[in-house]
Amino acid sequence: MAELKRGPFWITNTLTRKKEEFKPLRPPHVGLYVCGPTVYSDVHLGNVRSFLTFDVLYRWLTHLGYKVRYVRNITDVGHLVDDIDAGEDKIAKRARLEQLEPMEIVQKYTNGFHDVMRLFNLQAPSIEPTATGHLIEQIEMVKRIMANGYGYEANGSVYFDVPKFAAAHPYGELSGRKIEDQLANTRDTEGMEDKRSPLDFAIWKKAEPMHLMKWPSPWGEGFPGWHLECSAMSTKYLGQTFDIHGGGMDLKFPHHECEIAQSIAADGTSPVRYWMHGNMLTVNGRKMAKSEGNGFTPEELLTGNHKLLEKGYSAMTVRFFMLQCHYASTLDFSNAALQAAEKGLERLMAAMATLERLQGVTPEPSSGADVPGLATRCHAAMNDDLNTPVMIAELFEGVRMINSANDGKLALGQADVDALKELFRNMVFLVLGLKVESVAKDDGALDGLVQEFIRMRAEAKARKDFAASDRVRDQLARLGIVLKDTKEGTTWERA
Ligand SMILES: [Zn+2]
């Protein structure tokens, strides 16, 4: 059964640009590393989409029976404001703005990130290492890179020697960028003076006196380069070579390219067997970004309190909306698409509720319903590079079966009903990670309704129809609404 359940699982390896059968290094164990958030501001929905992709990957691998060690880091050192190794530490900058300790900023936005992950029902990773908690490992890695001749010190910083590395190893394989093109396109920029080549990147950066986050090192007080933490922490927890590394498409270059170079330079091995990259979320065709003014926070999304939103949408509606698109395609966020997803999710959840009540027609065999075939197709879709939109389309085939059976138009045997229950529970709850949302009624509307019942009860009392007034009170109590008679009149509260 376990073997059957596993099946061949194919993923698009962005390193080879091919769909490849996933074969872990040490089955049944799988090592998965995902680049986590930089905790200096709130996450927006584009970030959520990226983490969701790997949440579904984690869930699917687990469903297939693998024992996954899922590592997702917290970047709490703060990398530089721009990508040219100049400028200011983002977390320190934010700390000055908000008059807080840097670690206070880190804690605040880490808590906020976790709240958002819980809201969208993303599972917590097995290990969530922080960059500040792994300074020793990072310094050791810088030393190994230097000892192998691929790092040099200049004025208290240490740089990775890209041209020297590229002469001995493939460089640019992941992003497809050629070193000659990169050189031709590089202008001299600020912070260049210590580098031998404009392509070199800092693996250790000297701290200016004003810098808040800095640590002692063999090269003086400073802080690690951004790319380094992921290399050091993935090596520590998953080994020098591990199975899957994931992240958003925008991290391919320079971040992931630099991770590969660092690992080869330090330990002589390419670190990752399968690279996976999730695509962007766009809004009306434009990339979601804070600078574009279209980066909704989850709170704005739920309340509808944003100029681009016609109304609020629940977290599961948004999750379902995102899963209706393959992770490698761009997804455009629009009110029309969200409202369609809302209806679709309602239909799916209603069918699941119907299914729980459905009784099989025994001993008759099913008529015209191929439940085992449906289950096979759902598995096949997920095994085909996590094709959630196809899997969801298959589930709606199941929804039609459930509704027909409920209407008496389709006879389903008990075995088929049980198989449908298992399939839907597994695919909808465990794999897609959807959950039943308590319908968040607007308390204003609820209050209006309850006030109407209070008025009816008062009228019944006035005409001395106590049976009717008690009926109203008892009926509301059964719905979890308790009435209280006070001198000022009748009030209500939730039980
Ligand atoms: Zn990373």
Image (spheres, grey):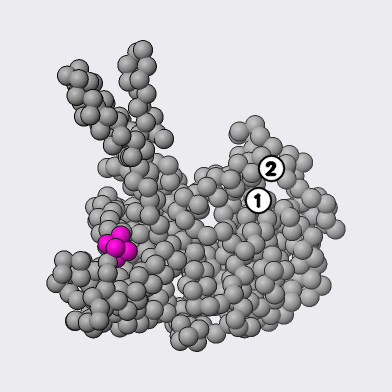
Q: Is the CB of the residue bearing disc 2 within 8 angstroms of ligand 1? A: no
Which amino acid is tagged 1?
Answer: Asp
Q: Residues within 10 Å of mark 1 (few under 14, many from 20)?
A: many
Q: What secondary structure is the stretch in magenta mostly built from?
A: helix
Q: Residue furthest right?
A: 218
Residue 479: x and y in percent read 33, 40
Q: Front-most of 429 and 114?
A: 429
- What residue lies at 63% left-to-right and 83% top-to-bottom? 26
Residue 207 among those drawn in magenta: no
Query: Does 364 appear above or below 473?
Result: below
The answer to whether residue 262 is visible is no
Which amino acid is tagged 2?
Answer: Met
Secondary element type, mark 2? helix
Q: What's drawn in magenta, residue-wise?
A: 352-357
Q: Is residue 159 left or right of residue 319?
A: right
Secondary element type, mark 1? loop
- What residue lies at 25% left-to-right and 78% top-to-bottom? 362
Quadrant of the rendered image containing residue 33: bottom right
Q: Is residue 51 left or right of residue 425?
A: right
* Tag 1 residue: 76
Q: Front-most of 455 and 63?
A: 455
Residue 166: x and y in percent read 64, 77
- What residue lies at 40% left-to-right and 45% top-to-bottom? 296
* Tag 2 residue: 103
Quadrant of the rendered image containing residue 454: top left
Residue 246: x and y in percent read 53, 68
Please report contact status of discs 1 and 2: CB closer than 8 Å, yes or no.
yes
Query: Does 440 appear above or below 117?
Result: above
- What residue lies at 75% left-to-right and 62% top-to-bottom? 138
- Mark 1 vs 2, N-terminal side: 1
Query: Does 444 appear above or below 80?
Result: above
Q: Is residue 74 left or right of residue 413?
A: right
